[in-house]
Amino acid sequence: MAGSAAVELRRRYEEIRGGLGQYVHVLAVAAGLKPCIDDWVGANRLDDYLALLADLGLTWVLDCWFDGIEDPGQVVGSDHLTTTVAGGVAPEMPAPPHAEAHVFVARSRDQAAVAQASGRYPVVANGRVLPKPWIDHIRFGQALGYPVCCVKSFARHSRWHADNPLWHAFLGSASPSILANSLPKHQGRSWMMHLPCSWSCEATMSQSRRLREHVREVDIDLADAVDQACTGTFLVLNELEAYRLAGARPAGERTAYVRAELLPSTRPTHPLRRLMAQGDHVEVDLACVRVYQGTEFLGAHEARCDTLGPEMAHLVRFSGDSDG
Ligand SMILES: [Zn+2]
């Protein structure tokens, strides 16, 4: 693909999706670097989206329509739900107003169908949760081409109400790399879409390195944007709340920062946001985040374990790739 063509396709994708979405990973599938991804697009733009896929030589399977839903907190077994919650409508039904299409994207319909077979969410029916069979986490990860080590780690730790997969990724990290940083993925600026087994997972870094080389060839601005978004110091509580600390530097027991950029997540529960916006220094231990402006103490957030995603407050510094 010529560079100018890739940039034009990116602009079309951004216009259709209202942002970068998973464009980096659509490119990965088109280049044969990944077997499949699943993506979401407004039902009213589905035809434009599918035309774009066709121009990239890709095919697709429409899985279902995602619709709005009431808070599912009262259903029996709600603590087995993931961070993504939506109403589901069968694809042969008319799309509800404001629905999104859930689409599997691949180079062959067989690859898309294999991913669809295990790529489902826990289902709520008649006020009760029907969990996804655990083996399907493994099958889905395989169908999306995720590293085996990361698939096993996800299957072990993705218990959203009782565990914190990002903390496990941190514990296993020798030297956190931008090639294994999934934190900015909801900004469309990560070289990966999976939660890695560690921030220095070799298998993930190898996949990301190939994708990064490809994107640098066809769309250097996009590659630079992803690199920049993945680099630097991040304050992490759980998958729903993490910040990139722009201009971060050590300051004794604390870390000074110029700006705390809240990373998008699937739910807007951000108890630290206002404090982080007011401050410029932070002191972090697992159980507490203390925020200062200069030497003045502004306030503290005590980590909670009684919400979706137990909070483990910690700082992670991601560095560039020595081979890249
Ligand atoms: Zn791994």
Image (cartoon, rainbow, N blue to C red):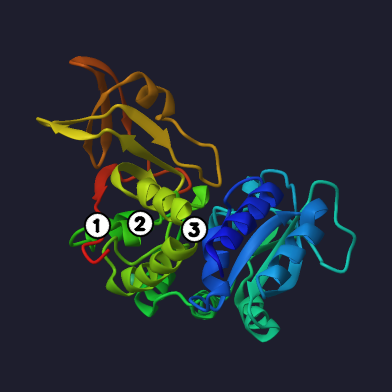
Is residue 231 among what the camera can see?
yes
Label drawn at residue 181: 2
Secondary structure, mark 3, is: loop
Secondary structure, mark 2, is: loop
Residue 166 drawn at (x, y percent): 35, 55
Which of labels 1 and 3 is toward the front? 3
Q: Quadrant of ligand 1?
A: bottom left
Q: Would you name the residue on which mark 3 appears?
A: 219
Q: Is mark 1 within 8 Å of ligand 1?
A: no
Judged left or right of residue 69, residue 288 is left
Whether residue 253 is situated above or below residue 228 in the rendered picture: above
**Cα–Cα span, label 2 and label 1:** 8 Å
Secondary structure, mark 1, is: loop
**Cα–Cα span, label 3 and label 2:** 20 Å
Residue drawn 82% across the image and 66% down it: 90
**How dense is the environment of label 3, judged by Cα within 10 Å: few (below 14), some, or many (20 and up)?**
some
Residue drawn 41% across the image and 34% down it: 261
Q: Would you name the residue on which mark 1 appears?
A: 176
Judged left or right of residue 63, residue 36 is left
Question: Disc 2, disc 1: CB below 8 Å?
Answer: yes
